[in-house]
Image (spheres, grey):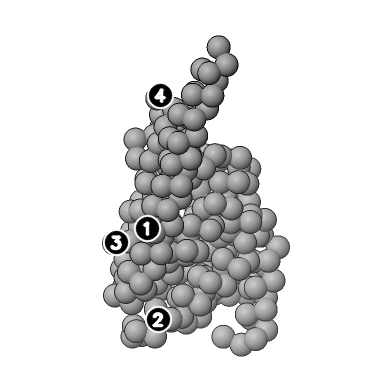
Amino acid sequence: MNKATYSLLEGFMLTCMDDSAHDKEHIYRVLYNALEIAKAEGHVNYDILITSCLLHDIGRKEQFKNPSLSHAIIGSQKAYDFLTEHGFEAEFAEQVKQCIQTHSYRQGHPAQSLEAKILFDADKLDVVGAIGIARTLVYTGTISRPLYSLLPDGTVSSGEHDTKPSFFHEYKHKLEKVYSNFYTARAAELARERECIAVNFYNCLYQEASSSYEKGKDELDRLVASQE
């Protein structure tokens, strides 16, 4: 891929990004993750891989406006249309489209090509470890969700059995479960290196929040009761 082609793709990507948790820096991290994974694989089509990485989240704006839409489906068609309109061969555009369609594990369509599997793993790596925690907290704040919910007895819920959305709910139902089912060995290795950081952060946050409520509530009840 030459610089002119890269700049064309990058420029289009930059016009589509409007989400603090899925911003241009997320795109670059996914691209760099993909290149690291690709070094351990053979016969990678780097033009398809780089293009797919750059354009994989260009449907986020549409999904943010209408959550019933899939950014993977919307973005894959946008990428196909952009590529064919700018002189790329239809077969190349279709391969990129397939990579983008299958990069989201929520979509339920398994990746088929090597480039699609690398994109999937590279994107998933940006959900694990410290960066995954940070991105989730940013997104949680953007859509005004709380850090945690309270149980009926007034104590802090771990999030495990919650039905209402919160950071703890997202951690227990998503972040805690993303360290398996990678397609590539290199991605799985990188994920394992990051896991302990996320686990320690969640445990510390839960402990601090729980301790605050348990000790503070008892003290408040004592002081309030003493004034009766």
Which dot marks residue 180? 3
Could you tell me how far apart the alpha carbons at marks 4 and 1 are, in whole angstroms?
26 Å
Q: Kindly identify the residue that appears in the image at 61 percent across and 40 percent down.
A: 144
Q: Residues within 10 Å of mark 4 (few under 14, many from 20)?
A: few
Could you tell me how far apart the alpha carbons at marks 3 and 1 are, in whole angstroms?
15 Å
Check disc 2 and report the residue beneath it.
Answer: 38
Query: Who is closer to the viewer here, 107 or 155?
Result: 155
Residue extending furthest bottom?
2
Residue 208 place in picture, x, y as percent: 46, 47
Residue type at tag 4: Pro
Check disc 1 and report the residue beneath it.
Answer: 199
Label 2: which secondary element: helix
Label 1: which secondary element: helix
In front: mark 1 or mark 2? 1
Residue 54 place in picture, x, y as percent: 57, 70
Check disc 4 and report the residue beneath it.
Answer: 152
